[in-house]
Amino acid sequence: MNRGLSRRHFLLSLAASGLASAAAPTLAEAPERSLRPLGRGDNVALRTLDTPEELIAKARLGDGIVGYAVLSAATGKLLESHRGTLGLPPASVAKSLTAAYGLDLLGPDYRFSTELWTTGAIVGGELKGDLVLVGGGDPTLDTDGLAKLARSLEEVGIKSITGRFIVDGGVLPYSPVIDTEQPVHVAYNPAVAGINLNYNRVSFEWEKAGDGYEVSMDAPSMAGRQAVRMAHMAVADRNGPIYTYDDLNGRDAWSVAKHALGKGGSRWLPVRKPELYVGEVFQALAGSKGLQLPEPVIEHGVERVDFIGRVESEPLHVVLKDMLKYSTNLTAELVGLTATRKRLGHALSIKQSAEEMNTWARESMGLTHVAMVDHSGLGGDSRVAAADVALAVLQAERRLNLKPLMKPITVLDKRGRPVKDTSLKVHAKTGTLNFVSGLAGYVDLPSGEELVFAIFCGDVPRRDAIPIEARERPPGMMEWNTRAKMLQQDLIRRWGDLFPEGKGLEAVGLPGVTPTTQTSSGAMAFTGTAEP
């Protein structure tokens, strides 16, 4: 089980400037049904368009709530909405807001870095002091990047050290998980720290051997795999649960139910000790070059003397494009945390940083309906309104050139098949949680005009009723989310027909509104002119 990976396979497996604007466009509430006046010369097909209520009913989302808003990109006017000021969980659509936050605070060319330092001089190949590996919050650092950094030890001639090997990930606060309400074993909910590796995922592989199994816990790279000791897997003869986790003497202790393994396989598991993970892998990489390092020690704020080497991420705009494509939660959290650190001059926890991002969104984007609890949308307690998200992506394109970073979305027909030669081009961010589905972005019309939209569907009570251990694939979730996605497609096609030139009914001003309390439906109600 010491196989190399192609770079494409490795990256895929790890992941799952605009016009200046002096003021935010004016949002407005439009009628629940956009009854476009039809003269004798108008397209008769418009008379047969399904209304929003009819499309929502056809989606069969049960008690799920649908909120959406669509704007003219040219004027910022609201063309159509349905419960557009009602707060719903955004899921990963939240990453579009985080991308804008990062671009605004850090700039598109910002690069994360990971560095090597010493606390003493190198004399005759011997380091008289400590070797310090310092994280800079890079969400994309992988085993190959760490190997490149290890080669800098050879370049400066270090053959032995008298001191300690220190790993410092203290530039950002540590959190053992992103969201506490996720199954323990899901790799999309890893720990977060100032130094991270392989998206804080470890590869668990197993292969049947006689009556038992051979198992490994590795950090993969293009060249091969580095075994890690900080994560251990035990095979247990039990009916359930399938996975258990324990923090045992500062290490990740896993167990798996034997009956679930079959003949063999692999999967990613989350890492809860990122600094130790990075330290062990770097120690092994240095050892392969002939330098035997002591066991890694976790320490923050060590006074450094001499710089040894650095590896950097791609520019932020590249990092964000990958984040929006693969929806990597760790990237979103690290970008958000780093942006807050730049904004305030000091780091905050995930929740506190999300609150700071909310403040930025109100001040910089003119939003009023935003209450995020993280930067990735993984937490189900976050609430945003479709009208605000539509405004945010409009502002982000005008000021920060967000649209080129959004992934293309295939337009589907009513049967779920790609529409051939469609004149609609969609670039957007998807979002999915259990019984929650969102989509927000841009629609290019045949006329050359552009729409900006956000759609959220959520059955929050049904989601909240699922036990945490069953939230990886709960019954009925796939079917519900598929119907929600088809509703999003129906709405996009409707807008293409209804607003072929990005024009709609004249919009009126929308008074400011503020979040209040949770409703029985699980959505957040808003004061002012909020929809019921």
Image (cartoon, rainbow, N blue to C red):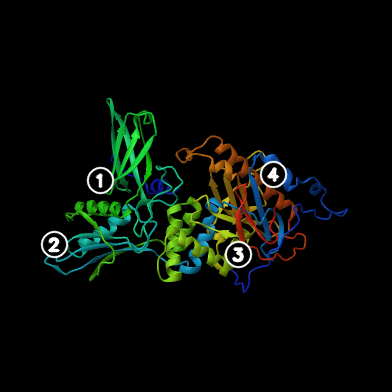
Secondary structure beneath dot 3 equals loop
Alpha carbon distance from label 1 to label 4: 52 Å
First-in-chain label (1 vs 3)? 1
Position above or below: 223 against 114: above
Q: Which amino acid does label 2 sit on?
A: Thr
Percent x, y for residue 12?
Answer: 43, 47
Q: Which residue shows up at 48% across the image and 64% down it?
A: 102
Whether residue 420 is visible, yes or no, is no
Task: Give the residue number, with chain letter if any, for mark 4.
Answer: 56
Label 4–label 3 contact, CB within 8 A: no
Q: What residue type is labelled 4?
A: Ile
First-in-chain label (1 vs 2)? 2
Position above or below: 312 against 492: below
Label 2–label 4 contact, CB within 8 A: no
Q: Which of marks 2 and 3 is in front?
A: 3
Q: Which residue shows up at 68% across the image and 60% down it?
A: 71
Secondary structure beneath dot 4 equals helix
Task: Give the residue number, with chain letter if any, for mark 1.
Answer: 229
Q: Which of marks 1 and 3 is in front?
A: 3
Q: What residue type is labelled 3?
A: Leu
Task: Give the residue number, with chain letter if any, for mark 2.
Answer: 162
Task: Give the residue number, with chain letter if any, for mark 3.
Answer: 367
Alpha carbon distance from label 2 to label 4: 69 Å
Percent x, y for residue 69?
Answer: 67, 56
Percent x, y for residue 112?
Answer: 38, 63
